[in-house]
Amino acid sequence: MISLLFARIFKLTIFIMALTGAAQMPIFKRYYIADIPGLGWLADFYLTNKIHYVFGAVLLFMALYLLTIFILAGKKHFKLSSSGMLRATLYMAVIGTGSLRVVKNLHSVTFDPFTVMLIDWTHLGFAMLLGMAAMYAFLRGRKSYLEKGPGLGFMK
Amino acid sequence: MTDKKNGISRRNFLKGLGAASGAMLLPARDVAAAGNSDEELCTLLNLSKCIACGECVSACREVNEPKFPKPKKPYPEMHPKSRVKVEDWSERTDVDDRLTPYNWLYIQSTEVEYQGETHEVNIPRRCLHCRNAPCANLCPWGAAGKQKNGIVRINEDVCLGGAKCRTVCPWHIPQRQTGVGLYLRLMPGFAGNGVMYKCDLCYNRIDQGELPACIKACPEDVQTIGPRSEILKKAHVLAEKNNWFIYGEEENGGTNTIYLSPVPFELLNEAEVTGPGKPGLGSVEDSMADEEKLAYAVGVAPFAGIAAGVIKAGKFLAAATGGKDND
């Protein structure tokens, strides 16, 4: 469906998002991971948060790029596999709740504490579900997001 | 005095609540809640008045005692032991010369030379209730949050005691008590380490139309409370009139605690003994400023993605159509 370069950048983005997202929990210092030479930055909450923002922007760009192509041109030529549909839905949920987190961190915005907790928990929950779905797809050999069929070669 | 006449003394605050209640035929509680929704509450601490009598500290402890941690012992064994330390204040609940889970307000007392005079300055210290609080923004679990009335609170039922809030707070204000809270029911050995505690500005008293305990108990009227714009106005009038200095208006992007001092805060900060539980008074940049800028990139990215997708889809469709024509 997509070029190799695009796929690699997407995977790298997801890896960095998962890493910096996990680093928002105080675990890397606790479990000595930040003590490994070169990984000290993982214990810096502000730095990892900024990196999460930067790659969040990259992920949003890529996700909306794919979604737009899918809506405008893709439906006639391919359809998502059930595994792909599940992961795409979870991506949307993670991106949606992540965007709400960015909004709530703005100076001009104050959500009530319950809403904030709801956003934080759903973001974390959807991210964990996405990780599990990706792992399941990988282990079961269902890595493709698409059903086999005509039109799979477009965008290459 | 001018400040009492024009400002928001505790008497005026209560009088205002009472008058508004009568006018609207609503309980003071409802009026307070409604009034708080428009503008954030802010406190002004006139340090020239504080005599370090400690009434505010005692009142805070007395009123908030039901909120203090009641840890269960023995504490679960946590891993790795060398990195996860027990922070237990339950045997030292009488400590009142620093912030602890059982002491959310203490008084820093210091002497400084300024313009040839010796000034003894007493500074009640507690959470400053930042306007864009990093503890509330960066808590991964949503345990720390800011209410619309400006009060920053930690939900003791949800907090896991990871102490990230203390790390990201420019003044490292929240304090941890091990052996209490949600982590005991999750993975006590491997995640969490208790609950974080700090001043919540007596949110429950404010909800009921009452003043925070420290303000009510103060015999010297050191503190006043009210909408932030009015508090700032009053602070600037007093600062200009007396050549005083303001702290909290810009620090960390602005806090809802404004200190007024007859001597520069740089001098107080240099003279103060700071350390764990003893916050400084230094200059603090806005902790969330970079995130504010990066939010623009996050906001623009989806539109850029849509534009790029439209172009790509157009090219694909044109190529597909052209291909069919050729067939």
Image (cartoon, rainbow, N blue to C red):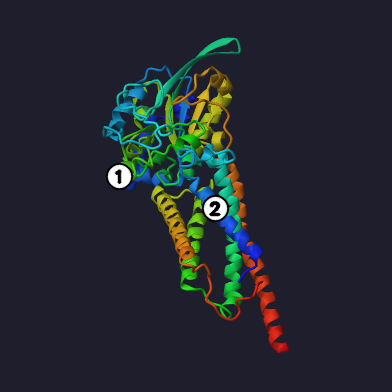
In the image, residue B93 sits, relative to residue A122, either above or below, namely: above
Quarter-wise, where is residue A2 in the image?
bottom right
Amino acid found under the numbered disc labelled 2? Met
Amino acid found under the numbered disc labelled 1? Arg
In the image, residue B111 sits, relative to residue A48, either above or below, namely: above
- Locate residue B153 relative to residue B296 in the image: left or right: left
Residue found farthest to the right? B326
Q: Residue at x 32, y 21 (%)?
A: B94
Quarter-wise, where is residue B29 in the image?
top left
Pick whichever, B5 or B299, lies toward us: B299
Q: Residue at x 42, y 31 (%)?
A: B82
- Locate residue B83 relative to residue A103 in the image: left or right: left
Q: Residue at x 45, y 55 (%)?
A: A123
Image label count: 2
Instruction: Tell me the number on the disc at residue B185.
Output: 1
Q: CA distance from mark 2 to mark 1?
A: 29 Å
Pick whichever, B310 or B213, lies toward us: B310
Quarter-wise, where is residue B324 in the image?
bottom right
Pick whichever, B176 or B188, lies toward us: B188
Q: Tell me the quarter of the image containing the C terminus of chain B.
A: bottom right
Report the residue marked by disc 2: A17
User: Helix, strand or loop at disc 2?
Assistant: helix
In the image, residue A17 sits, relative to residue B118, either above or below, namely: below
* Residue at mark 2: chain: A
Q: Position of residue B17 (x, y in %)?
A: 36, 39
Q: Position of residue A3 (x, y in %)?
A: 65, 67
* Discs 2 and 1 share one subunit: no
* Residue B288 shows in this picture: no
* Residue B206 shows in this picture: yes
User: Helix, strand or loop at disc 1?
Assistant: helix
